[in-house]
């Protein structure tokens, strides 16, 4: 007589609706334990579009306006180099760059850290259109999530700053999640840095929200603007001076 599989070895049972709480717990525990073992004390989060081309792929980009955003790739790459060089020492890793693990701005962040032989983290997500992890992520720090909310929790779990480059719906979601959690004091205050004030002010009339009383004027203090990697790093360094 063949013995039935143990519950924790029964894949169909683990993937059933009954085990959703177990899967949620695993999506919390696996990155948490791994990052602790890897000595990751704190992170700098880079958000932005996966569609922004790299210098190597910009010639293939058929959208002229999108191709014009290639400079953001280089700034994200440089910021990751600066942050990683200044903050990672031996096993104690402060300000480790974390991205969503895909292409574009995410690739640039992981690439910059890799170029100075430092660790970086990927928090990837299963999507209907496959998002492959970029090749620059540290092998032991590449995670894939099924649940968006667990992924977003890990983005901010160790974060000391959130840096936002131009992006689409996903980037907006991540930006406003961070702003809301800081505004409502659910997480510790930290710099939220947006690249290119003109770009973001065209998209969102921040002053109008405050003028209507929909947010407090002091809520605007959460937001910082910059144009270069050096400016972004100065905002972070000054904040924690």
Image (cartoon, rainbow, N blue to C red):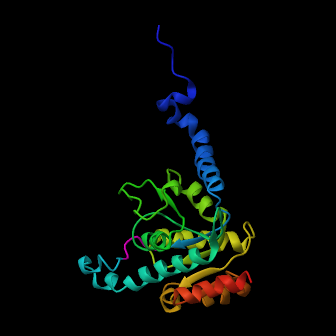
Residue at position x 61%, y 59% in the image: 154
Q: Position of residue 239 (x, y in %)?
A: 71, 83
Q: Position of residue 69 (x, y in %)?
A: 38, 84
| The quadrant where residue 209 appears | bottom right
Front residue of 6/15: it is 6
In the orientation shown, which residue stands out farthest toward the front?
90
Residue 122 horizontal side relative to residue 133, left or right:
right
Please tell me whether residue 58 belongs to the stretch shown in magenta: no
Front residue of 120/89: it is 89
Residue 136 horizontal side relative to residue 17, left or right:
left
Q: Main secondary structure of the magenta part?
A: loop
Please tell me whether residue 51 belongs to the stretch shown in magenta: yes
Quadrant where the image shows the C terminus:
bottom right
Question: Visible in this render: residue 213?
Answer: no
Q: Is residue 29 above or below residue 176?
A: above
Q: Position of residue 87 (x, y in %)?
A: 63, 74
Residue 64 horizontal side relative to residue 99, left or right:
left
Question: Visible in this render: residue 40?
Answer: yes
Q: Which residues are magenta?
A: 48-52
How many numbered badges does the structure rendering display? 0
Q: Position of residue 121 (x, y in %)?
A: 53, 62
Residue at position x 51%, y 72% in the image: 47
């Amino acid at each position: 007589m063949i013995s039935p599989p143990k519950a924790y070895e029964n894949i169909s049972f683990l993937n059933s609706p009954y085990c959703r709480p177990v899967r949620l717990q695993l999506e919390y525990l696996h990155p948490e334990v791994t990052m602790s073992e890897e000595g990751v004390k704190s992170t700098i989060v880079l958000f932005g579009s996966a569609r922004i081309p790299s210098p190597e792929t910009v010639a293939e980009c058929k959208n002229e306006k999108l191709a014009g955003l290639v400079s953001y790739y280089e700034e994200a790459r440089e910021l990751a180099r600066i942050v990683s060089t200044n903050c990672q020492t031996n096993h104690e890793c402060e300000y480790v760059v974390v991205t969503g693990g895909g292409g574009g701005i995410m690739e640039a962040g992981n690439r910059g850290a890799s170029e100075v032989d430092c660790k970086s983290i990927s928090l990837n997500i299963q999507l209907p259109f496959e998002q492959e992890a970029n090749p620059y992520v540290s092998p032991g720090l590449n995670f894939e999530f099924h649940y968006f909310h667990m992924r977003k929790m890990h983005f901010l779990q160790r974060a000391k700053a959130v840096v936002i480059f131009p992006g689409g719906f996903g980037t907006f979601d991540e930006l406003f999640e961070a702003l809301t959690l800081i505004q409502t004091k659910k997480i510790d205050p930290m710099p939220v840095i947006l690249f290119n004030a003109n770009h973001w002010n065209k998209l969102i009339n921040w002053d109008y929200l405050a003028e209507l009383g929909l947010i407090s004027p002091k809520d605007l203090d959460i937001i910082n603007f910059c144009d270069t990697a050096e400016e972004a790093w100065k905002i972070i360094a000054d904040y924690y001076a």
